[in-house]
Amino acid sequence: MKKTLQLESISKWLPTASKPIIISGPCSAETEDQMVTTAKQLAATGKVHALRAGIWKPRTRPGQYEGAGEEGLKWLVQAKKETGLPVTTEVANAAHVDACLKAGVDILWIGARTTVNPFSVQEIADALKGVDIPVMVKNPINPDLELWIGALERLNKAGLTKLAAIHRGFSSFEKGPFRNAPMWDMGIELKTRIPELDILCDPSHIAGNRELISFISQKALDLDMAGLMIEAHINPDAAWSDAKQQVTPANLAKIIDGLVVRTVSSDNKTFKDTLSILREQIDQLDDEIMSKMAARMKISEKIGQYKKENGVTILQVNRWEEIIQTRITLGKAMGLNPDFTTDLLKLIHQESIQIQTKVMNKVEERV
Ligand code: PEP
Ligand code: MN
C-alpha cells in the first residue's frame, strides 16, 4: 500500500507504562483551582498519561462559556508543573498556536469544527512550520474521511510527523442514543487507509452523557484504538460546558479499571493454530458466498431480460416484500440479526435492480 504520511508512533512521543493511553481533564479550563485540582486528582489515580482542557471553546450558540482564553493557558501549565503530566489543548487558528507554543503546551489538538475547514487547518499548519510538536486531529463534524485525511496531510506537509487522529463521532440529523454517531466504520476505514496512524477515541463527545462512556471506550479498545480522551471534572454537574458527559476523577479511574484490554495477536502456538483453522473456514465460506452471489446476479440478469421481453416493470413491490419477510424469518431461525438480514437484502436488491435496469435499457444492435 502507498505510504501517504510520514509518521512517528504515539508510543515515541507519549510513552506510557500502561495501555491504553489515557488523556483526561475538563472540557474547559474554568478557574485555576478547578483546573489544578482536577489535574491533581487525575494524576493521583495513576491512570492518566496526559491532561486535556479547552482554553478557547467553539460553542454552537453565542452567549455560552467560550473559554478562559490565554489566562487559562497559565492554569494548564500550572497543572503540568504540579502533576508532571504533559498537557494538551485545542487550537483553531494561528494566534492560538502562537499562544500555546509560548506558554509551553506539549501537545495540540484540532477540533471537529476546525478539521472541516481546509483554510483553518492550513493556517494552523503554516503557523507550525518548523515546530516539532505533536498534533492530534479530531474527525470533522461530518463523516468525510477525505477531510480528516486532508487535515493530517496538511500538517504532515508542514513537517509535522508526531500526528494522531481522534475519533469523536459525527453529527447527524437523526437523533440516536449518542450525541455524535460513532460510525465506527469511518475509524476502521481510516486505519485501513493509513495503518501506521494511531487513532484515539473520544467517548465523551460520542456519548454526550456519562452513562455510555464505558461502553464506547470498550468498543474503541476492541477496534484496536491506541487510547482514549475522556473529559473529567472535580464537579461534573457544575461544569461550565459539557456537564452531562463529564465524570469525576474517581469515576474515570473506575471506568479505566473496568476496561478489558485485548491484544491484537498472541504468541501462543495453540492460539495461532486454532486461529488459522478458523480463518481458513472463513475464507472457504466467503468463497461460497461470493460464488452464490455471482450466480444470483446472473439469474437477476435473466429475469431482467425476460421482463423486458414481456414489457413488465423491474420493481415488483409484492415480490420484494415477500423476499424480505421470508428471508428475515429464515435468518431469525438460523440466529441472524433481522437488522443485518434486512441491510444485506437491501444491498443485494439494489444491485439486482441495477443489473436489470442495464438489461432493460440496453439498445439491441440492429442488423
Ligand atoms: C472538546 O474536546 O471539548 C471539543 C470541543 O471537542 P470536539 O471538537 O470534538 O467537539
Ligand atoms: Mn467538551
Image (spheres, rainbow, N blue to C red):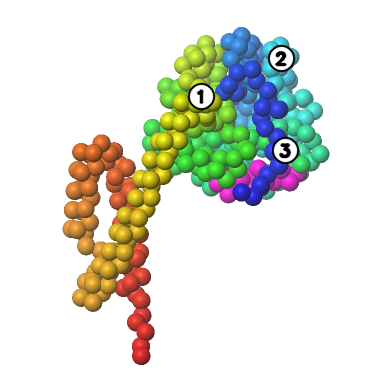
Most common SS among magenta residues: helix
Task: Assess whether mark 3 and mark 1 are in contact (beta carbons under 8 angstroms).
Answer: no
Lateral position of residue 284 relative to residue 125, left or right: left
Residue 328 x/y as whole percent: 23, 44
Foreground disc of the pair 2, 1: 1
Task: Assess whether mark 1 and mark 2 are in contact (beta carbons under 8 angstroms).
Answer: no
Up/down of 302 relative to 130, above or below? below
Lateral position of residue 15 relative to residue 214, left or right: right
Residue matched to label 1? 268
Q: Which SS class for mark 2?
A: loop
Q: Residue at x 60, y 43 (%)?
A: 194
Q: Quadrant of residue 75?
A: top right
Residue matched to label 2? 84
On-image quarter of the C terminus:
bottom left
Q: Please state the extent of the stretch shown in magenta in the rendering.
A: 145-158
- Which of 74/306 is in front? 306
Label 2, label 1: how far apart the Cα atoms are: 38 Å
The amino acid type of the residue labelled 1 equals Asn
Few, some or many residues within 10 Å of mark 1 (<14, 14–19, 20+) = few
Foreground disc of the pair 1, 3: 1
- Which of 350/293 is in front? 293
Residue matched to label 3? 161
